[in-house]
Image (spheres, rainbow, N blue to C red):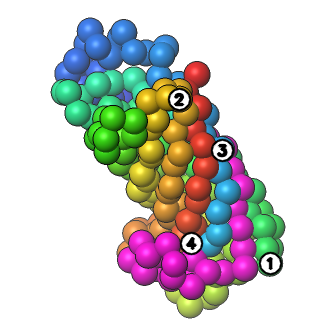
Amino acid sequence: MRVRGIGILLALLVACCPGRAADALFRKDSIFMFGGVHSSGNMGQSLNPFYKHEQSYILGAAFRREFADIGPYLVAGAEIGLGGRFGGMSSAEFWGGGTLRLRGIPLGSEVAIAPGVIVGLSAVTKPLDIERRREIEHDGNATLLFYLSPELALQFKRWPNTELVYRLHHRSGLYDTLGKMQEGSNAHVLGLRWRL
């Protein structure tokens, strides 16, 4: 039932701008490569990129396809990603979800900023030290959690196919909905996105 609902939502998104969505179908693919450090705080605390950090790191890559223009300002798509998490216990992370972003907002004649968000699911092979502590605290399981990742991308007129991206890489049980977990982990990541 949930998969059918997602399919209907995607069909509605594409239907809202059929000409523009079809035109952009094969022109909005991108690869994002990044690295970052995990935060010791919850998501609210981790919105501050200078909040206390863990001794654990993430390196990753993601493939994105943007497939629907929603009016003049929004673009919808989907992303899948793979990351390696290091420090304490090492593990792999896999995520996927829907994406939504604003078109670039000019910050002058050469640079624009494009805020966006990714919402989906994240699976790991082993918990990080901070996730293990939170598993014990809640008698939970951090293997499969929700993925929520707000991001800011800087776009450059000189390099139209390259973006500098900052993202808060967040895993959460959403108040015990998944894995009996509240918070999973948060990482501040910085990387480059190349449009193919």
Q: Residues within 10 Å of mark 1 (few under 14, many from 20)?
A: some
Upstream in the sequence, badge 1 or badge 2? 1
Q: Position of residue 48 (x, y in %)?
A: 44, 75
Q: Which residues are magenta?
A: 39-62
Q: Looking at the picture, which amino acid does disc 2 mark? A: Trp
- Look at mark 1 in the image and give the residue it sits on: 88
Residue placed furthest toward the bottom: 137
Disc assigned to residue 159: 2
Question: Which one is in front in this view, the residue at disc 2 or the one at disc 3?
Answer: 2
Asked whether residue 145 appears in the rendered view, the answer is: no
Upstream in the sequence, badge 1 or badge 3? 3
Residue drawn at point x = 19 percent, y = 27 percent: 71
Asked whether residue 74 appears in the rendered view, the answer is: yes
Q: Position of residue 2 (x, y in %)?
A: 36, 43
Camera-side residue: 152 or 139?
Answer: 152
Distance from the alpha carbon under mark 1 to that under mark 4: 14 Å
- Look at mark 4 in the image and give the residue it sits on: 185
Q: Looking at the picture, which amino acid does disc 4 mark? A: Ser
Q: Say what secondary structure mark 2 lies in.
A: loop
Above or below: residue 36 compared with residue 105 = below
Upstream in the sequence, badge 1 or badge 4? 1
Residue drawn at point x = 29 percent, y = 25 percent: 69
Residue drawn at point x = 36 percent, y = 45 percent: 113
Disc assigned to residue 33: 3
Upstream in the sequence, badge 2 or badge 3? 3
Dot 4 and dot 2 residues touching (CB under 8 Å) = no
Upstream in the sequence, badge 4 or badge 2? 2
Upstream in the sequence, badge 3 or badge 4? 3
Please tell me in which quadrant of the rendered image residue 185 appears. bottom right
Q: Looking at the picture, which amino acid does disc 3 mark? A: Met
Q: Say what secondary structure mark 1 lies in.
A: loop
Q: Residues within 10 Å of mark 3 (few under 14, many from 20)?
A: some
